Image (cartoon, helix red, strand yellow):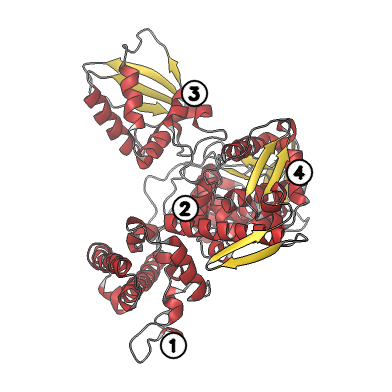
Amino acid sequence: DVVAEECGDVAVMRDVLLPAARAIADSSVRHAMKRGQFEGPVWEALFILQILWAAEERRLEMARAAVEAARQEPRQRPSEFHRSLSVGRTLSTAAPARLGGVHRSSPTAALALPRACFQVEALLQANFPVELELQMFVQHAKMAVINPAQLCTDQAWEVDENGVLPRPFMSFMANGNLVPTVFKQKVLHVENVARQRTEQQLQVMGQQGASVQVFGNLLRITAPQVRLEDVFFVLEVHRDDLLNDTAVALHSSKPEELRKPLKVKFAGEEAVDAGGVTKEYFRLLCAELFAPEFGTFKCDTESRYLWFDPGSNNDPDDFWMAGAIVGLAVYNNLPGLDISFPTALFKALKGKPVTQQDFQQAFPSHAASLQAVLEWLPPDGISGTAADQLFEDTFSLDFSVSFDACGKTKTVNLLGGDDAAPAVTLARRGEFAEAFKDWYMAKGIEAHLEAFKRGFGHVCSSPVFECLSEAELEAIVFGEKDLDFTHLRNGAQIVTGQVKFRDGYLDWFWDILNGFDSSQKRQFLKFVTGSDVAPVGGLERLGMKVQRNGGEPTQHLPTSHTCFNLLMLPEYSSREKLQRLLICAVENAEGFGLE
């Protein structure tokens, strides 16, 4: 509380306290690695970081309270708000209402420091032994993750008479909020490999005539005959029947069988799976299983994220299989699935509530419509009754939602039951917005989501997995996504006009793009297409178009038409000018150059 109150200015925490604390922690880790002893100073440095983490959480609570207090004050009606906004009786998936409302981020979101500010980078930079950390996590922490808020209040975390922290604190994974995601992924990989080897050994030992011999620290297992199926989960599929073959194999296999290392064999082909066949299998399967045409998921045209189709008539087993496939990819350390799910899915897998911000990420148009409803203000000087009537006349909403189900429009009551949905009043608009969000993200797709979670948990469940946050799980599943711009170039089209680009100019352009870092590549995708997520099938299927937009003399920046994935590119006199103005346009694209 003292730190939080003294550091009301976020700059004090960000620029002074955290850099000093992280420097101490990084130095302690490096020094301990040189000595080979992980004693007091390392864990004391982590404890300081945890105190700062708790102080940051407390500071955010204070900021939220201040924002909420400000919201309770009477709001002045914006003088420029004169538009009469109108939508139908429901906000439907077929024709989402565009009310022109601008989404505003939560005021407290801008105050929150990134998790990376608290993380011990020396674990990666100094190549801390992952196997050793897994051992400490098991032996010291019993694979339990610390709640930072309890460190200052729970007596279990008191130091002993020698000033030494309790043994369960002595693990980096136990202090998971301070560990970089990449390091956690390495620990998860080591744990998965260890469990896979255990399953292999148990399978072999179960054979009649198997024996074990111990030579010092070496374990030698002998068996009369070891089949490939005894040590691997062998998945044999036909290329023309991937979905059915996969479903049969997954449903007929026990969880312990699925936890062996995966080997894929395409029927009738002799290729030996050294990793490449498995990657090809996941690519082909995802293209079918997660395609909107299959009927399990729908792709929002604006965000390009997949989400469960509330009108899907598919069997629950299809959703179970989708979850199991994602689980298999995580368990076999095959990140970078060529699919795009919003953060809400990973929150659901971790049992975390979904917010309006999550809804906005998945369904931007719906969220903008709801925001306009929530921000509407009546004219000054009218009575409450008149304001209610004007609100209902303006929006004409009721507590219902419409969606497409097998070509037919269905409407359901957001409040439940078969009675006619009541009208949305000014006083109940917040309730309507919350119910609308909950239906799309939970209630309307409850059976589909639960089947997906069961499939995922059937394969991917472990103590290390449980200590991952939803953001970390998302990063592990998707990896860097498809940021290989050679794929983007392969699918790109040049729109020819009266004047063509001069020879070699587009080679400059692609060389510059390939030199972008991951953040710049995502910014470029959002600049041209309106989304930093690749479509199903990868960047090649994006079909980006490039058109010449004048030449020298010019200082015009590149612009784009996001509805058509069209980049309007001026022809500059030099490579340096092209790079400078392209980066300027991409990095300042918020509300600029986009149509």
Q: Are marks 1 and 4 in contact (CB under 8 Å)?
A: no
For numbered disc 3, what is the local secondary structure? helix
Residue named by callout 3: 491
What is the distance, in whole Å, between disc 3 and disc 1 at their CAs? 61 Å
Q: Amino acid at mark 4?
A: Asn
Q: Nearer the viewer, residue 129 or 324?
A: 129
Q: Is 316 on the left or on the right of 63, as rendered?
A: right
Residue named by callout 1: 155
For numbered disc 1, what is the local secondary structure? helix
Q: Is 447 on the left or on the right of 25, as rendered?
A: right
Q: Quadrant of the C terminus?
A: top left
Q: Are marks 3 and 1 in contact (CB under 8 Å)?
A: no
Q: Amino acid at mark 1?
A: Gln
Judged by depth in the image, the label closer to the viewer, 2 or 1, is 1
What is the distance, in whole Å, between disc 1 and disc 4 at their CAs? 52 Å
Q: Is residue 56 above or below residue 524?
A: below
What is the distance, in whole Å, between disc 2 and disc 3 at their CAs? 42 Å
The x, y position of residue 263, in whole percent, is 65, 44
